[in-house]
Image (cartoon, rainbow, N blue to C red):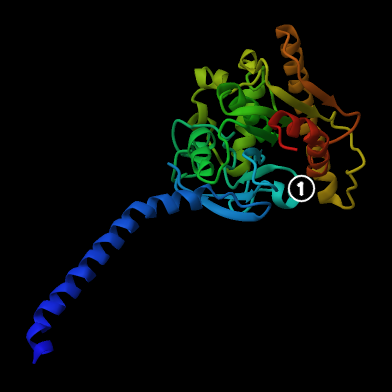
């Protein structure tokens, strides 16, 4: 009878205790959850490979990432060429870029997509091919992607950028306009004087051939200031103090050019012409830097066409300079 008489009071005390525990526990969760999320976000994967989807104004962008071997904050962006694919960045399968930096303390970042974009912010979607979005690649590479990677301990102020062909042009342009982000820029067979006589027309033809892209949608009509802003030759003064590696072949077939059929000979012939044009504009860029008193590491090879094996070899040659600039050994 004694226990029965105290039953309501006993359960009141237990109920109060349970409620206090729940409230206290809930408080812990509310306070600790953001802290735990922050700890997870700051935990840098070491040396592994991941494919991530990064939010952007263009929609979610796929990015292939090889994390720094020892969790360091340095990063190296590798930009693709004119015919960039939507499934993989060609650096990841046309070269051994990931193997080259596998033991180094730098995160290799390979954005996927951007065909014929010059990795720039466009005015409008291309109307020739009914493009559904407006390219905003400069915004992505200099704001949205660095913000995302910063959640994993990647320093947005210690970045290198290397590109081939179209990507080489973009690498120098991005570095010139975002010196707070980039400490190194590399152009491999890039077009570094895009407003030289005939270059606007050549770019227009190349973009249409790559996927029926309209260059007017990119930087406007040929006299639009956006053409000058995206010309490394014109933005060269802003490159003072930046570590740069710039290379080009001369279009003469070399050790990696061994066509065996008509298609191979045709591709080699086209690669010869593209590389010669790159060499001419890169020489003009070299003279421009010399007149400005800006040092850069220029490498002009005695042979070489517009082809991936040469760019893979050039990346290896640039590697020590990249790691020094980013303090990523």
Where residue 266 appears, as percent x and y from the top left, is 81, 44
Where residue 113 appears, as percent x and y from the top left, is 58, 46
Asked whether the viewer can see residue 81, the reply is: yes
> Which quarter of the rendering shows the N terminus?
bottom left
The residue sitting at the front extreme is 2
Where residue 170 appears, as percent x and y from the top left, is 62, 30
Task: Give the vertical position of 178 relative to 254 (above or below).
Answer: above
Q: Is residue 132 left or right of residue 72?
A: left
> Which quarter of the rendering shows the C terminus?
top right
Q: Is residue 229 left or right of residue 324?
A: left
Number of marks in picture: 1
Task: Give the vertical position of 295 relative to 260 (above or below).
Answer: above
Residue located beneath label 1 in the image: 103
- Comparing 167 with 296, the one in front is 296
- Comparing 19 with 200, the one in front is 19
How packed mark 1 is, by other alpha carbons closer than 10 Å (few <14, some 14-19, many 20 or more), is few
Tell me which residue sits at (81%, 39%) in the image.
316
- Comparing 155 with 143, the one in front is 155
The residue sitting at the bottom extreme is 1
> Residue 105 sits in which quadrant?
top right
Tell me which residue sits at (62%, 42%) in the image.
210
Task: Give the vertical position of 259 relative to 200 (above or below).
Answer: below
Tell me which residue sits at (62%, 32%) in the image.
158
Asked whether the viewer can see residue 188, the reply is: no
| Element carrying mark 1 | loop
> Residue 321 sits in which quadrant?
top right
Where residue 311 appears, as percent x and y from the top left, is 79, 39
Q: Is residue 111 left or right of residue 3?
A: right
């Amino acid at each position: 009878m004694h226990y029965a008489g105290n039953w309501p009071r006993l359960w009141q005390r237990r109920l109060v205790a349970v409620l206090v525990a729940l409230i206290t526990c809930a408080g812990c969760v509310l306070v600790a959850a953001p802290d735990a999320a922050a700890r997870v976000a700051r935990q840098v994967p070491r040396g592994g490979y991941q494919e991530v989807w990064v939010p952007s104004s263009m929609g979610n962008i796929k990015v292939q990432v090889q994390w720094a071997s020892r969790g360091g904050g340095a990063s190296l962006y590798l930009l693709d060429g004119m015919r960039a694919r939507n499934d993989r960045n060609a650096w990841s399968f046309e070269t051994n870029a990931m193997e080259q930096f596998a033991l180094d303390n730098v995160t290799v970042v390979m954005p996927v997509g951007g065909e014929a974009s010059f990795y720039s912010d466009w005015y409008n979607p291309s109307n020739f091919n009914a493009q559904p979005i407006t390219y905003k690649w400069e915004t992505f590479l200099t704001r949205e992607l660095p913000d995302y990677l910063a959640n994993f301990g990647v320093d947005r102020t210690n970045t290198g950028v290397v590109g081939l062909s179209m990507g080489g042009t973009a690498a120098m342009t991005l570095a010139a306009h975002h010196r707070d982000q980039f400490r190194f820029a590399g152009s491999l067979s890039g077009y570094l004087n895009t407003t030289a006589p005939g270059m606007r027309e050549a770019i227009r033809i190349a973009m249409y051939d790559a996927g029926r892209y309209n260059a007017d949608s990119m930087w406007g009509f040929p006299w639009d200031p956006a053409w000058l802003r995206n010309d490394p030759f014109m933005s060269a003064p802003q490159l003072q103090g930046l570590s740069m590696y710039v290379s080009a072949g001369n279009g003469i077939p070399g050790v990696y050019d061994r066509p065996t059929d008509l298609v191979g000979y045709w591709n080699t012939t086209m690669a010869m012409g593209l590389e010669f044009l790159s060499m001419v504009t890169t020489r003009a860029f070299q003279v421009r830097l010399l007149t400005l008193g800006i040092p850069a590491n220029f490498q002009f090879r005695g042979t070489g066409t517009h082809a991936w094996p040469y760019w893979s070899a050039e990346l290896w040659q640039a590697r020590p300079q990249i790691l020094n600039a980013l303090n990523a050994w």
